[in-house]
Amino acid sequence: MNAMTERFEPSGADGKWQRIWEERQCFRADDASDKPRSFVLEMFPYPSGRIHIGHVRNYTMGDVLARYKRMQGHEVLHPMGWDAFGMPAENAAMEKGVHPGGWTRDNIANMKAQLKRLGFALDWSRELATCEPEYYGHEQALFLDLYAAGLVYRKESAVNWDPVDMTVLANEQVIDGRGWRSGALVEKRKLSQWFLKITDFAEELLEGLSTLEGWPEKVRVMQENWIGKSQGLRCTFRFVDSAEGIDVFTTRPDTMFGASFVAIAADHPVAQAMAETVPELAAFIAECKQGGTTAAELETAEKKGFNTGLSVEHPLKKAWHLPVYVANFVLMDYGTGAVFGCPAHDQRDLDFARKYELPVTRVVSDAEHTAADFPSDEAYTGPGRIVNSEWMDGMSVAEAKAAVIAKAQQEGWGQGETQYRLRDWGVSRQRYWGTPIPFIHCEHCGIVPVPKAQLPVVLPEDVDFQTPGNPLLRHPTWMHVDCPTCGKPSTRETDTLDTFVDSSWYFLRFASQPGDKPFDREAIAKWLPVEQYIGGIEHAILHLLYARFWTRALQRIGLIDVKEPFASLFTQGMVTHETYSRIDPSNGQPIYFAPAEVAKRGESAVLVADDAPVEIGRVIKMSKSKKNVVDPDDIIAQYGADAVRWFMLSDSPPERDLPWSEAGIEGCARFVQRLWRLFGQYDAAATGEDKALDRKRDQIVHAAAQDIESLGFNKAVARIYELTSATEKAAPSASRSAAIKTLLLLVAPMMPHLAEEAWAEMGEGLVADAAWPTVDPALLVDDEVTVAIQVKGKLRDTITVAKGLPNAELEKLALASDKVQRAIDGAPVRKMIVVPDRLVNIVA
RNA sequence: GCGGACGUGGCGGAACCGGUAGACGCGGGGGACUUAAAAUCCCUUGGGCAUUGCCCGUGUGGGUUCGAGUCCCACCGUCCGCACCA
């Protein structure tokens, strides 16, 4: 009937439609639109050089949602950019002698071309890269605003310092106490660092989690744990005959009468001071610091202590004196760095008390035991009545907590307090490739913010990476400036911002990008919050917590009106693949082979090069080191963008891992052709009605829409297959032609190139601008239903009847069934349960 | 240790609020077309008895119910996150 060719050729069609979308600026978001708005966002990539398959999955999901929302008549903002600052660029500079900027910008160009080959409906006019002054200059302005509001401060802080590379290392970059690159022993150094006051927002960030209904429970729980709120009593245990004392934080003030010692951290000031004159203590402290910090080491680490010989008074009974130990299990950076030990009701304290033969007194009854004597080696941490605690006896744990806190506050030796595990965010990095922190150090005026008129503070391009250390410190002129306040010679701050700052507000810049300020408040109000954010679970805490904090901070200082940046969050699974390896006989280590080097022979596999077998390993995340990767460019070239996109959506639920398989992608490519052939059968002139097909079509349109909205792409895909089969089997009719056209619209968000190519023959304009098919609500409900007939809960027969048949009729029909009568076998019918339009259960 | 998620055919997975378990895809088996192959199309595919019906079956063991993959209790296993957090 038309000019459609036998096969769909992605090699020609993909590029053609990508150019047309671009020329017509189909996916440009209009700030002035009065349609309902959808901001669909995927986590922007780091420009490492190549797009990997995980990006393809992530961006395909977002793209389907964005295209679907457009079909539903929404004004969609679907932007893309680059998280472009960071260490890999500096490493490339050191290893290959290239400039980090050149390396990064080349990578961006390559990756952008790769993304375009996938046909994503992105508004490229809003593209941004965090490494460009047009972006980071505004970030500097925001940083100054936060500083003015008292949310930025400087303090001395310990960092991991690599003495060879002369740089600060992140914790992840310290391996067995050595720098990952230099191999040098890492030192703890005290440096003045810039901090953001995220702890000011601890309670807000915690409470805000309960409003994020569109977020996975898992991520909310992770953030809750990270913030780590605990409530209790902060109080002083005075040294005997002294005004001085040790401050202690406890969540169990109810167990105070069970106290038998006070323990302080190795780096507690009291311990440090004493160590200067007591060499044994100094040695013990050194020993404490040696232990590893990995989970396994902590698990097995023995509780150890050093008796200082000091005594403190029990706050509730001055005459009761407790010994003070330095203990290896007390942490300086949580609470006050000191605890009181109540061995009967805390496992660590119990282990410690048994080892040093300290008293163990039961003060919470487990309903069975009330005696002070506590013979068990397992601490009791459950609920119960307070015992052996004088005036507290008989109280519940909660009552006792409140009573002790009230007494402490009344008597002035303590107060109720809330502790958070969350620490302020240290954002200083002694790195070149990051946003310069916009401050000037002046001998006379101290720390002086760079005046906004002088922003951006631009990174110098002429830097040298051949010598270790921060090139900004060595640059001949860059750091030398006059103080903006007094005009005397001063120096610039040479630290740059943690790259997590860059990604904490990029979504705002996507929504609004004026030249003279970071964003426009009204435009933010129009687009934010992001309707759907999609990315990897690895960002559950850091990025997502920082972005929430940054948004709330900007809201508090009056720059924007939203509190939470992401209304809904979706964390997608990884793309996995089996591994192929052989053991290298020389060292016993496996050698891995890429899928392209291997041929599958049924259950086993051989190396193409020598036709000898290779071991097939577990299905795991694609990684370069295991060589179980597929390159997006290769598979796009081989199968076309639509087949690759379809594969990314098929089979596995999007939150779970997706196993890559050759057979799977081939199946997808076959389906592309199958649809193409079906589209070729479209006949606008066909007549006649096919009620069953009409019904199926409308039901699937409706269900697929719901699936896409809930990101259940695998379910939408299954339904599309179903409609395809039904349409193929149907005889020509107007209904069949309508079904073909509908099918095309259903797959348009998923296989946009195929859809455009076919639409050119049967529709008007671009399918990218077409509307989602409408459904007749009357057709959504069947007029005939299949009713299951059970006898005592077991299926015996099914009958097809008109929908809405009265229960009495259903019962009559059920009993009329031969199969049912045989199953009843003459027994009297005691009861019949009827679920209208679904089932009849006969109890005989 | 604490917290979270999960466990269904050979594989990926469906199954609304407790109501016909295994949709859809992959793989397998059989067939058609073809000189042949590719491509395509059709049939079939949980297990076991059997001769057209029956039994078993959603990690294991209990329970609630007319009826449980779904709810409750206990256990086993896998994955993820956090952790001497007072």
Image (spheres, rainbow, N blue to C red):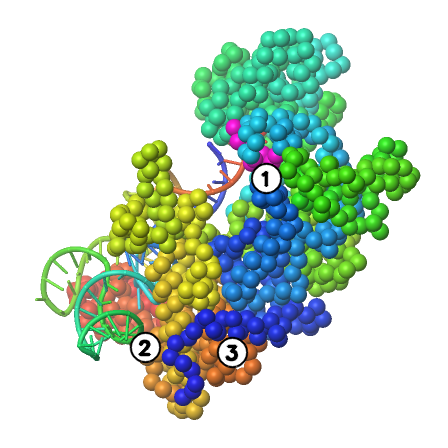
A38 in magenta: no
Q: Secondary structure at mark 3?
A: loop
Magenta span: A169-176
In the image, which is nearer the foreground, mark 3 or mark 2?
3
Three-letter residue code for mark 2: Val
Please identify the quarter of the rendering in which residue A567 is found: bottom right
Where is residue A67? Give x, y as percent.
55, 69
Nearer-N-terminus badge (2/1): 1
Q: Is residue A320 visible?
A: no
> Is residue A359 shown above or below A616?
above
Q: Are marks 3 and 1 in contact (CB under 8 Å)?
A: no
Between A370 and A314, the residue placed more toward the observer is A314
Compared across the picture, whether A347 is left or right of A249 comes to: left
- Marks 3 and 2 belong to one chain: yes
Q: Are marks 2 and 1 in contact (CB under 8 Å)?
A: no
Where is residue A89? Give x, y as percent.
61, 46
Between A818 and A131, the residue placed more toward the observer is A131
- Marks 2 and 1 belong to one chain: yes
Nearer-N-terminus badge (3/1): 1
Three-letter residue code for mark 1: Trp
Q: Which mark is residue A801?
A: 2
Give neighbour class at mark 1: few <14, some 14-19, many 20+ (Cα, 10 Å). some
Q: Is residue A502 visible?
A: yes
Nearer-N-terminus badge (3/2): 3
